[in-house]
Amino acid sequence: MLIGSFYALLWAAALVYIVHAAAGRRWVGWGATGLTLAAWGLLTAGLVKRGLAAGHWPLTNRYEFALCFVWAIIAVYLLLEASWRERRAGPFVLAIALLVATYAVTRPPADKALMPLPPVLRSVWLQVHVLTAMVGYAAFAVAAGLGLMRLVRRNPVSGHLPGEEIERAMERAVALGFPWLTLGILTGAIWAQNAWGRYWGWDPKETWALITWLWYLLFLHVRPLRRWRGKRSAWLVVAGFGLVLFTFVGVPWLVRIVRLETLHGY
């Protein structure tokens, strides 16, 4: 019930953000922010309820991680909106949040069922590793929304916000996400050593997480170069989030189709 209400409110918030961006009415913008905050609150309550019912943090499968991923995307975006004092990025960032949320709510019932925590996940490193990676991914999602905004800067939704200002916000989001993803990889390596006796095993999930990390490292290195400013940098950030989605959704599919060996459940 809470998750369904959250999903409906998130759609409403995205639509109101579009109206605000097109019309420029301040009170409409406040309404969009209020709806987003309400959706975030309902999702928070839903995650807390699920965690209490399951007896563990809701971080154990793709359904739960997707919901927490959306939770973090909205939180990072609201912090950006408060510091930037600009709401025209709302339609783009919420479009990405809705993409992940739709993936979550359309999961089969078996994925949504409460399950006991497997022995391998009964570790404090579950929370530390997954939460740090999740914050990094969420910041990259916000950066991708800003990248999309930069690519279509002069449409009725994004208006005539200066491209340089959008790029600065995009770079801030990547700069926020990169150390969190780095921590996620490091804590994952420590957990792997404790659980499996090795820090790194070139598992498909580990490999694609490293590829994602290297991609954003590339972005941070080329962003000062003039020829990589503007839409090129926006494309790099959008493509980077494509790698994030592939690491999250595509790798399990690839493992299943190609029958690769993996120790990661999602």
Image (cartoon, rainbow, N blue to C red):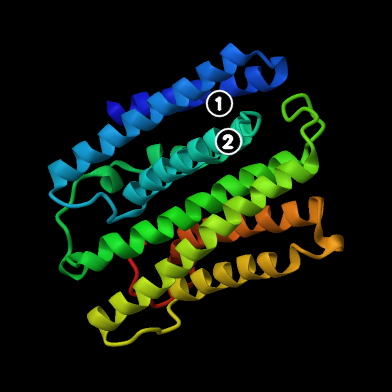
Q: Is residue 88 above or below residue 251?
A: above
Q: Where's residue 41, x and y in %?
A: 34, 30
Residue 146, by quadrant, is top right
Marks counted in the figure total 2
Q: Is residue 115 above or below residue 128?
A: above
3D distance between C-alphas at marks 1 and 2:
7 Å
Residue at image position (77%, 64%) is 224
Give coordinates of residue 156: x percent, y percent: 77, 24
Q: Secondary structure under badge 2?
A: helix
For the residue marked with disc 2, what is the amino acid?
Ala
- Residue 55 location (% of width, % of height): 12, 49
Q: What amino acid is found at the position of numbered circle 1 in the picture?
A: Ala
Residue at 70% over, 70% down: 221
Query: Which x, y percent locates residue 122?
Result: 17, 65
Question: Reading the chain from its start, which is encountered first: label 1 or label 2?
Answer: 1
> Along the horizontal axis of the image, is 69 left or right of 191?
right
The answer to which quarter of the image holds residue 104 is top left
Q: Which residue is mark 2?
A: 95
> Please, is residue 44 above or below residue 36 in the view?
below
Residue lying at 27% horizontally and 87% vertically, measured from the top left: 197
**Residue in front for this viewpoint, 22 or 242:** 22
Label 1 sits on residue: 14
Q: Quadrant of the N terminus?
A: top left
Residue nearest the observer in this picture, 105 or 187: 187
CB-based contact (under 8 Å), mark 1 and mark 2: yes
